[in-house]
Image: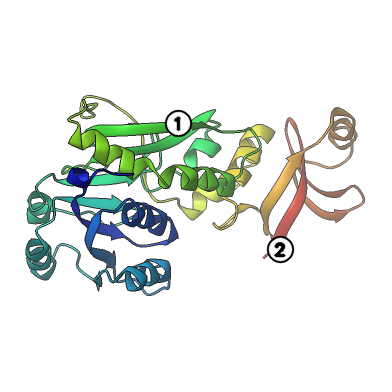
Amino acid sequence: MMIKNRILKIVFWGEDAFSNVVLNSLVQAGHDVKMVVSPLYNNLVYKKLEYTCHKNRIPYYRFKDINSKEVVDLLKSFEPDICVIAHFQRLIKGELLNIPKKGFINLHPSLLPDYRGMSPQHWPIINGEKESGVTVHYVDSGVDTGDIIIQEKFSLNENDYVSDLQNKWIKIYDHIMIDAINRIMDNSPVIVQRHLAGRYYGKLRSEECIIKKDITIREAYNLIRGVSMPYQGAQMDNVIIWKAHPVDKEYNDIIHNSEYPVGVYINSEKGNFLRLKDGVLIIDKYKIL
C-alpha cells in the first residue's frame, strides 16, 4: 500500500499486453496516471491497454510520430512527475526527455547491460544462459544505457521455451515498477551503465532462425526453444520446428548409427526427428512449408 506522498503524476508509454500488466500495477498502487501513449501500428496489440484506460477513465492516445510537436505539447499539458515506459518499441528523443520532473524510466526485460535492444526474449535462451531478469532504468539518449534503478533475476531452466521466459517476466512486471518508483523517492543509489560494455541485439532476423547443419544438438535445441511460438520458429529445409525434446542414449545411438545423414525427418520409420553431427532431437510439433 503506497503512502499518499509517494503518489506521482505519471504518463505511461506502452503498446501491448505486457505493457498492460505494468499499467495495471501503477493504477492499483494508486498512482495518478494522466495519460497513456501508444504508437500507431496497423494491428490490435494495443487493445488491452485501451480497455484498461477506458475502465479507469485514463486518456489514451496513439501517434504515428511519437516525437512530434503534437506529442511534446500534449505531454507538457499534463505536467507529469515521471514518465514510465514498458514494452515500447519506439525511441523517445529530444525535448520529450526533459519534460517530466523526474525523467523517463523504462522497463527492459533483461539483466542490463546484457541483452540491450529488441530481442531480450530470444537470445538468453539461444545463448544457453542460466538466468535472466528484468531491469528498470532511466532513459537517456542511448538504447537501454541509462542508469539502473532496480533489477530482479530469475533462473532459466534448460528446457524453458520463450513463452516460459515471458511468463516469468509477467510475475515480475506486476510489482517491479512500483519498487523502482519507491527507490527513486528514497533517493536510493543507481548503477551507472555507460562504462559497462554489455551486449546488444537488434530485432531477430529470419536468417538467425535457420538451423545450420554444422551446429551441435544443444545449439539447435536452444534455437528451437528461443524462437518458438508466438514467434516464427526454427527452420531446417522446408520444416519449421516449434517444439522438440532430447532423447535418451539408447534412441540417440539407434539414430546416430543408422543410415540417416544430418537433416530433418518427418514421418520416417523412426518417427519425426532432427539429426545433427553429435545427436538427435525428437520433433514434437512442426509445420511443413
Q: Which amino acid does label 1 sit on?
A: Lys
Q: Which mark is residue 111?
A: none
Dot 1 lies on which element? strand
Q: Residue 153 carries which label?
A: 1
Q: Position of residue 65 (x, y in %)?
A: 19, 68
Q: Do the residues labelled 2 and 1 touch (CB within 8 Å)?
A: no
Tell me if mark 1 has few (under 14), some (14-19) or many (20+) residues whose alpha carbon lies within 10 angstroms of its own.
some
Q: Where is residue 37 in the image (x, y as percent from the top left)?
A: 25, 65
Q: Position of residue 42 (x, y in %)?
A: 37, 75
Quick check: 289 above or below 161? below
User: Quadrant of the image for the C terminus?
Assistant: bottom right
Dot 2 lies on which element? strand
Report which quarter residue 251 is drawn in.
top right
Confirm whether residue 228 shows in the render.
yes
Q: Where is residue 87 in the image (x, y as percent from the top left)?
A: 36, 53
The residue to which callout 2 is attached is 288
Q: Residue at x 71, y 63 (%)?
A: 288
Q: Which residue is drawn at 52% across and 33% down?
A: 127
Confirm whether residue 112 shows in the render.
no
With 65 as the anchor, is 120 left or right in this view? right
